[in-house]
Image (tube, grey):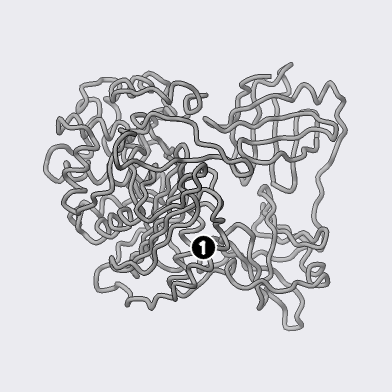
Amino acid sequence: MAKLMITLLLILVSANSVAEPIQPPSKASFDELLKTLVAPNQPGVSVVISQRGQVIYQAALGLADVASQRAIAADDLLLIGSITKQYAAAALLTLAAEGKLSLSDSVGRLLDDQRFNDVTVAQLLNHTSGIASYTSIPGYMMDERIRRDISTQELIDVFAELPRDFAPGQRWAYNNSGYVLVGAVIEALTGMAWHDYIEQTLLQPLQLNATDYYDDSSAARYPIQGYTGSETVTTALPMSISQPHAAGALAATARDVDRWQYALHTGQVLAPAWYQQMITPTEVMPNYGYGLGLGQFLGQTLREHSGGIHGFVSDGIWLDESQLSVVVLANSDTPQIQPTLLSKRLAAVALGQPLPIDWPEQLLSTQMMQQLHGSYQIDAETQRYLIHRDGELFSQRQGGSEAKVIYVGDDTYALADSLAYFTVQRSAEGEIRGVDFYQAGAVTPVYANKVSDEVAVRNVVELSEQQALRLIGDYQLQPGFIIQVRLGPSGLTAQATGQVAFALAAASEHELYNSQFGITLLFPATDEVPTQLTLLQGGARMPAPRVNN
């Protein structure tokens, strides 16, 4: 049930504009990439790539079961998390096409529940309802509550009385409660469990026999074990599959998800007018439709959704013009590489346009790193820094985290663990003027002009022990994700759930930061003991209430 933020393209490409079939690279090209990113002795991935419905690559790498060392197989079932929302949205649109409801209908009327009278069906589908997401209730996803078997109505009652985040239609906020209500509407209109309706109406006609709601662990077919942790791998926290509901409870093989994507995007699931509604964004969020993210990748129209749930993460992308589908399912919620990155790296290879991160690394001289070091102006308020330190080069957008820079030749530099890269722009004399920076899969760069050979350094103050002790504690950024602030022999540190600890410097007694990761932690000056901190990173401002001392 992970969040997805990608860029927008509002064009539905007509059939006569579909690209010619690509000539897929050799299987070895995909194998080489996958084996450099996924170790076989850790929880792994199941991958399928197809064009026009024909598989051009399929692989499973890593462990399905760490204890027994059983390897993942292509026919293994994995939870797909929020990719489930595509199926739920398509099911509700099917009912709308049959005249069973209108997208402008009141959810309260359909469910006979006046608590949702002011919310429309469309606002559930596009995350503009303003209803509080139950997965954001402090502690809910980590404690015994998530382990309870629960009915649809009992799950609705968990969040129905919570204060609204905003008035319906006013803003966009990714919302799992909304898709629980999508499932509830399906049940109210059909008299069937939401997943039974999806199976009967959508899956069976497409012969997607491996996709289902698996709630019987003793059955012959059941999802493989999910894991968590990177340095120390453990089984994921237990969870009742009734809890994610229509927001994220389905499981499937990678091939079944691939076949679903092909069917959905080639008119086999919805009539054209209803599919058009599914891929039309709202004014307040131009890159999300109904259960689908909308964007561009390497000049093609992108449809995408990712998923994240206890023990599993996933991503499925569809490129319209080439009818290319890439599905990556992982059986760890802290995987060796995020499926959202792996899917696009594989897609780029399939298109014959590998991203710079997958070009061979070249030697970068100390002299060149010194020449690149400095500040680059993006716009009136924002700079990017290229930092030469300890024999390496790093890139950091103002307010963002540092990324190691990898030289791949021809004045092109990739960012480690990223799809982004930049190219150096030079004067006729060969002097560095600036850089063209390309975000993930973008074909149009953002130029940053070099304005200084120096990089600004933040002020550092020494805190007294009493001032430092005031700040230590556990702060919950979101359910299951805690920032621990600690004081040790080397000073203050912070550590987020599942990540390594990092050092903090103090700009004042109420402000800590780490320049490497572009993180600032602000604490209320008026509280004797801070009741929360505010995390600033990458332009985002995220409150995290203190959950203990």
Instruction: Classify 217 as above or below 405.
Output: above
Seen from the viewer's position, the closer of residues 188 and 521 is 188
Query: Looking at the image, which is closer to me, 458 or 197?
Result: 197
- Residue 455 placed where, x, y %? 80, 56
From the viewer's side, name the closer residue of 273 and 263.
Answer: 263
Q: Nearer the viewer, residue 472 or 527?
A: 472
Residue 372 occupies which quadrant of the picture?
bottom right
Q: Is residue 534 left or right of residue 7?
A: right
Percent x, y of residue 74 = 37, 56
Residue, x 55% and y 49% (percent of image)?
42
- Left or right, 98 with respect to 391, comes to left
Q: Tag 1's secondary structure?
A: helix
- The kind of residue tagged 1 is Leu
Q: Quadrant of the C terminus?
A: top right
Q: How many residues crowd mark 1 within 10 Å: few (<14), some (14–19), many (20+)?
A: many
Place residue 429 in its image quadrant.
bottom right
Picture layout, residue 351 above or below residue 525: below
* Residue 246 position within the rendered picture, expressed as x and y whole percent measured from the top left: 31, 36
Would you say 64 lies left or right of 212 here?
Answer: right
- Name the residue carrying label 1: 34
Residue 454 in picture, x, y percent from top left: 82, 59
